[in-house]
Image: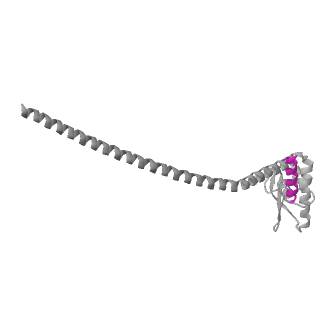
Amino acid sequence: MEELQSTEILDREILEDARKKAQRILKTAEDTINAQNAEWEKKTAKNIETLETQYNELKNIEEKRVMARLPIDKLRAKIDKIETLLQQAVETWYKSLSRKQILELMGKAVDSMKKVDSEQWRVTEVCGLEREEIEAILSSIPYSALVTGNYPLSTANYPSITLETDNVRITSSIERMAERLLLDKRAELIELLEFTEEV
């Protein structure tokens, strides 16, 4: 009976000792986990801070780049708008011309061909003109038959006629006249457009 009791006591002591060891192991494991969690949180916070710093630096760089490019973009948009308005002005001007005025303008350009010493001009390209109109435009100079009788021969947006000799090639074109007008009067037209926009 005494042996049985001492065995029970011994079992209880072993169990108590095992329980204490298990508690120590669990406590150590918990302390290790807590330490690792604290270290992880510290690293995470540091990484977040680094990422926020990098993000803010990149944001500042991008803001500076956008702000530096903004005046150029505004200027480019303004130039594009002015070019569009100038082209619209040319189109409006062209539409306001009567057919007679168009032929007179082209005829004046052809008159300059009289200065070229040539017995015969050849018509090599025509756009947007009828045979009678061509003959009216060319009435002041000697010219040979057209190379081809199909009209128009060009796909330009405005009427034009090209004549050649063996040494010279001249084109009378409403489009070129408009381009020359824009080139010569560009500054005045732009100033007028800007004034109109302000008003």
From this view, report whether residue 139 is shown above or below residue 118: above
Q: Residue at x 92, y 53 (%)?
A: 104
Q: Residue at x 69, y 56 (%)?
A: 68
Image position, residue 27 (x, y; %): 31, 43
According to the image, what is the colour scheme of the structure?
A: one colour
- State how many labels appear: 0
- Image quarter of residue 58: bottom right
Give the magenta-colored segment's residue range.
Answer: 184-199
Q: Nearer the viewer, residue 171 or 152?
A: 171
Q: Nearer the viewer, residue 94 or 53?
A: 53
Image position, residue 152 (x, y; %): 79, 50
Q: Nearer the viewer, residue 166 or 173?
A: 173
- The extreme top residue here reads 1
- Image quarter of residue 125: bottom right
State left or right for residue 138 relative to residue 5. right
State left or right for residue 7 relative to residue 120. left
- The extreme front residue here reads 2
Image position, residue 69 (x, y; %): 69, 55
Q: Is residue 145 visible?
A: no
Image position, residue 40 (x, y; %): 42, 48
Q: Is residue 96 visible?
A: yes
Q: Nearer the viewer, residue 79 or 40?
A: 40
State left or right for residue 35 relative to residue 1. right
Residue 174 covered by magenta stretch = no
What predominant SS class does the magenta segment belong to? helix
Q: Which quadrant of the figure contains the N terminus?
A: top left
